[in-house]
Amino acid sequence: MNEKNFEYLSDQLKYTGFGEALQMELKQKLHQQEPSFTLYHETYYEDRVARATLNFNKAKQGDLYFFNSYTVEVQKENIPDVLEHTFYMGKTGNITMKESYNLLMGRSVYKELASKEGHTYNAWVQIDFIQCDENENFKFKQYHQNYGYDLEATLDKYPIKELGNDIFKEDLLRSLKRGNLHQVTFLRGSEESKLFIEASPQFKTIGIYDQDLKKLDNRHYKDIGQILVVYEEVGEHKKKSQRPQSSEDEEPREGSKRRQKRANSL
């Protein structure tokens, strides 16, 4: 067994979210020197079971093994079929186990990706449950910087208590970028409400949920100061559009109508 290869694969498993529980089994598989092998991992998120099958292949020459991909199965609420997707490992943009669960639950994850030419860029990714590739794997939708979604600016539209603390704010941003549902405190006057939020780049907003994870209407939870500004702008616009015309303005219009009638009769 190649000891350095074992250490590299152990770190790769750890940083992909599989922890250290698979190290003993990984070492046994490497000692067997088979062309390929699989490891299995099971965990719980939000009272749901997520199962992963990890795929390893040996190099054609030498004794090195590579962690190529892992397939995750999870059952979404109110859907009888099990959702399944294979996540491939690369140099950048690797999806962690928790991120894979979040993606299968329909949420979005912010990642550093690489183009075919090797250029790196950042984008929000979300599973497209309608389209599949030739391997029956779900395709991804991407929302790049030019799409115009600014998570921090979006959060500032809501009276979230944690945004007032720089440390809590950074933790919140980091968590939402991983696709997590994150509990925050909404301020409404002297009242505080504990709710869950998620990033929603597709619609350039956030999703808000109650304690039972029932989705709520965002408009009822925006910062009241910003809502009043919008109402004032709408009110001023309506006043201008509904302002009655003076008699001085009306007379030329009547004259214009009469002239139009005469012209039409000629």
Image (cartoon, grey):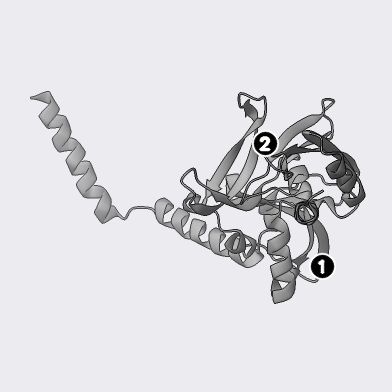
Q: Name the disc covering residue 60, or none.
A: 2
Percent position (x, y) of residue 29?
86, 41
Sequence-first disc among 2 and 1: 2
Q: Nearer the viewer, mark 2 or mark 1?
A: 2
Residue 254 coordinates in the image, percent (x, y):
22, 42
Locate residue 245 relative to residue 59 in the image: left or right.
left
Q: Residue furthest left?
A: 266
Please tell me whether residue 107 is drawn above or below residue 156 in the rendered image. above
Label 1: how many residues lie within 10 Å, few (<14), some (14-19) or many (20+)?
A: few
Residue 20, image quadrant:
bottom right
SS class, disc 2: loop
- Amino acid type, label 1: Glu
Q: Residue at x 60, y 49 (%)?
A: 124
Look at the image and tell me whether residue 219 can be seen: yes
Image position, residue 114 (x, y; %): 54, 49
Compared with residue 173, is residue 207 higher up or lower down, i.e. above or below? Answer: above
Kindly identify which numbered label has been placed on residue 191: 1
> Residue 177, percent across and down?
67, 56
Q: Amino acid at mark 2?
A: Lys
Q: Is residue 64 left or right of residue 122?
A: right
